[in-house]
Image (tube, coloured by chain):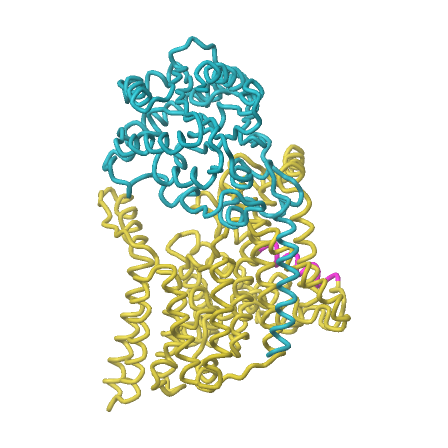
Chain colours: A cyan, B yellow
Amino acid sequence: MKRFLILLFIFVAILIAGFVAVLSRANENTDEFYYRFATPKQSSLVIGTSRAAQGINPSIINAQLGRTDLFNYAFTNDHSPYGAIYLRSIREKLNVESNSGIFILAVDPWCLSSDKQAPEDEKFFRENGLMLDQMPVVDMHPNVFYLMKFYQEPYSHLLTGTHNAELVLKRDGWLEVNVPMDSAAVQRRTVSRMNDYREKVAPAYAPSNLRMHFLIETIAYLKKHGNVYLVRLPVSAEMKLIEDDYYPAFDEQMTLVSSQNTVSFLNLRKENMNCTFTDGNHLSKYSAHEVSERIATFIKENTKQ
Amino acid sequence: MLFNSIQFALFLPVVFFLYWFVVNRNLKLQNVLLLVSSYFFYACWDYRFLFLLIFSTLLDYFTGLKMSDAPNETRKKFWFWLSIIINLGFLGVFKYFNFFAESFAQATESLGWHVDPWTISVILPVGISFYTFHGLSYVIDIYKNRIQPERNFVVYSVFVSFFPLLVAGPIERATHLLPQIQKVRHFDYIRAVDGLRQILWGLFKKVVIADGCAEFANTIFNHSDQYSGWTLVLGALFFTFQIYCDFSGYSDIALGTARLFGMELLRNFAFPYFSRDIAEFWRRWHISLSSWFRDYLYVPLGGSKGGTWMKVRNTFIIFLVSGFWHGANWTFIAWGALNAIYFLPLLLLNKNRSNLEIVAQGKMLPTLRESMQMLITFGLTVLAWIFFRAESISHALDYIHDLFVGLVQKSSIIEAVNFVLMRTGFVLPAFVFVFLMMEWIGRERQYALSHIGWTWPRPVRWMLYLAIGFAVLLFAGKEQQFIYFQF
């Protein structure tokens, strides 16, 4: 038995060592989420859902503000609407030593909504049990927790560097989306996305005061570590109609939140920006550049010294 | 808890440690530990169905005792049929009720009457077909006075629920497994190492070959209307390797795991794709189920002893039931019927037992005749798997039609080449080739890896095992369910 256990231990140890060596090859190209959990704790963050993940490019803002520390920590509408789970993850990711960070919080009607059946009941929050809920560590490389639990591809892809060229996560956490932008392709994706929102999302959701409470709690927490800015990103005309129909008082609500919590609110939906979208909901990478520059200008104008 | 999951990788060493270091040399405690571990293993799927498993165990345990103690034949018969009816009743309700209800509604619809089928929303309890057949063989053997009932409930429960075989077999016999549970097990180094080696080989088959092939088999079968000829051949080949490596991989892990606990389970596969005719294929594929049907269905029906009509009838019954056992779908029945059609000529010409020995035994290569026989048998098997994998009979027929029509089209060859170049790549085909070579080299053993490298120096042999282990880790991604869990 002793011999069996010793040889088994050696065999398994060699295998695990080799496997960890493969896992350590994970990098920003691994998939569209991994690198956000593999960087050290950050002092400045972009917070929000996929609109922010694709639409706010930290490198542009960093360059304009003369900083290097802004990191995009936004995920998707399912994973990271405002709530206890996202706030806990933000606390894990934030370098609490820092008190001069900038925090861009993207807001829209969907990330402040929940299941229509019980919008004020946390048990029904859609992010329950998903990635952020189950990630115990968000600043570890290689992040074995993520790779073992959420990485969807064979690990051989880490060795060969195979990755999805359509979704490229940059080192600053910005998700670059490379999809065909010819009018037919955009139209096809837009129709599908708008149908989804019109027929599935809007009828199933309701604005949630509890999520609003968590937004305010997130603002309060981040204000201790720097300046907070609320941003409503531009959307296509079709999406605008759906959102106005779904949550007509959203802008007023955000204006109120910003004034009550003494943070600045940039409503880019009201500005006449000539943006392009991949699907009516997400900014194209070209417009993301433009929007990020506009956000940087806004931050410059509103920075409290 | 899947065999290819992290949970199982943690569960197995814990049970192994407790078994050999805490309850070692104490038969009662060894069995209690195996039973508790097995129930925990099963409850990880759905604890509610644990009660069904316990009920089924209790039913067969008590009816076994009642039959043995029955004062007369009538009373014995009563307990026997009670057990059979309840066992098959559960299987019927959980597995086949909706199929019969919907088929009845379709049949009446075709006669012009509209009937809304009353279906029930039930989840199929994992492993029900396997543990029900365990129990049935036990009850039938007692009824036929082949065995005495087991009076120790824990021993009997371990026979039914032993975790390596609980969810997808092999379907054990009381005569084979019960005696092993009745005596204390001692650690045997050679057996344990062999067990680990078989687990490693099973994981390789499942994770590298089966899951690798599954991706492309699914792509092609799910969009078969978009592909033609040779790409459809590729799809059928991918599924052929997927189903074999998935199920025989599972069986290898089960047998290897049992060996770690000092037990030997029945062999389930014996290199079926190297068969020279369909009869040989069925002696080598899912052996524990084929032999179950032979002993408890085919032989009682008269086997091949009667006239021609009897032979034809019995052959069709056994293959159709075998197909139906896999699931409540006409595609499985068609798969069974097709195999019956393949098998019948051999039976009627008395050639069904002409290939009993291992192909090219003691030689490196088969003869040209053997190669041709293997190729034809493999081709027939691939064709039958199309029915097994298809969503419906019409899907299978369309698939086969498009396959044969496209074979002669030049565009179909280009499409298939593009599919390989753009989608599959060469890594998976290379692994399949290496796998086939290893299976061929190891075909005279229990499993392919059993004696490969046996005479090599240990470091070299370890390099082989490490390479296989590493391949398993590299290809492991999202955990994939075993196909036979659904049966």
Q: Is residue B224 visible?
A: no
The percent coordinates of residue B354 (x first, y second) are 62, 72
**Image quadrant for the N terminus of chain B?**
bottom left
Image: B366 above or below B146: above
Image: B469 above or below B164: above
Q: Which residue sits furthest top?
A: A272
Image: A24 above or below B255: above
The percent coordinates of residue A182 (x first, y second) are 54, 17
- Magenta stretch holds residue B468: no
Q: Which residues are magenta?
A: B368-380
Image point (69%, 62%), residue name? B438
- In front here: A300 or B450? A300
The percent coordinates of residue A39 (x first, y second) are 56, 39
- In front here: B404 or A96? A96
Image point (56%, 81%), residue name? B187
**Image quadrant for the C terminus of chain B?**
bottom left
Q: Is residue B42 visible?
A: yes
Q: Main secondary structure of the magenta part?
A: helix
Please indicate whether residue A298 sits to the left or right of residue A182 in the image.
left
The percent coordinates of residue B359 (x first, y second) are 68, 68
